[in-house]
Image: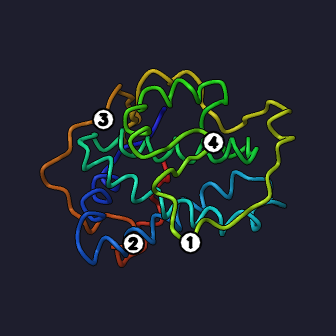
Amino acid sequence: MKLRQNVRHWAAKRALTTPVLGGVVNDKLVDLHTRVFAEKAPESRREERRDHLDDFFDATMDTYVAALDAGYPEAEAREITHLQANFDFFEHGWASMMEIPADELEAHYRRYESFFREYGITIDDPLGEFRPADGVADAPATPEALDDGVFENAVAGFADDVYVEDEDGDLQQGSATEPDDVDVSRAPGVSADGTDDEASAD
C-alpha cells in the first residue's frame, strides 16, 4: 500500500503511547480519519456512515499500538490499520472509500497474516479482538457499488510491500527510519495553532 510518512506521523506515534496526551491525539486522529474517508463517500451517504467510522477508527488505534508493540515499523503498523479499514469498506460495499482495489485485499492480508491471525482479524471480521465490547455503530451496506467494479480512490500496484512518500514527494519501499528529534507537539490534536488540521489520514 502507498502511504505518506512525515513529521506528523512520527509525532502521532510518540504521542499515542504517552499517558494523557495519547487520549487527546487518539480522538483527533479518529476525527481526522472519519472526515477524510467520509469525504470519499457519495455525499448522500456520508452522514449515515459517520458513527460507524468513528467507532471503527477508534478501535484501530488500539491495533496500531499493538502492532508497534509487536515490533512493526511505524508505516507497517499504520498500514495494518488501513487494511482493517479497507476490509471493512469491502464488506460494506463502500467501493469509493477503498484505498486499494478489491483484488489486492488477499495479497495484503497474507503479508500480515501472522499478526492478523493472532488477533482474529479477517477480511470479513476486520477488527477481530479489537472490536469494542459495546460494538460498532451500524451503517447501511451498498453491495451494488462493488458490482460496478469502480474503485475511484484506490491505488493499485503496491500489494507486495508498504511504500512511503515523504514530504518531498519521494517514494521509498518500506518504513523510513524514525528521527531522533520528534516533537510530539506536531501530532494532530496537540498543536494550538491549528496546523494539525493539515495532517493526512494516510
- Decide which of 159, 167 is in the foreground and name it: 159
Disc 2 from disc 1: Cα separation: 26 Å
x, y percent for residue 79: 43, 41
Left or right? Give the position of 149 relative to 85.
right
Precedes in sequence: disc 3 or disc 2? 3
User: Real-space Cα distance between discs 1 and 4?
Assistant: 19 Å
The three-letter amino acid code for the residue at tag 4 is Asp
Q: Residues within 10 Å of mark 1 (few under 14, many from 20)?
A: few
Q: Residue 189: which disc?
A: 2
Which residue is at 65% across, 24% downward? 103
- Compare residues 61 and 195 and report the one nearer the observer: 61
List the residue tagged with mark 3. 175
At label 2, the amino acid type is Gly
Name the secondary structure under disc 3.
loop
User: Which circle, 4 or 3, is nearer the viewer?
Assistant: 4
Residue at image position (48%, 61%) is: 59
Percent of width and height locating residue 15:
27, 65
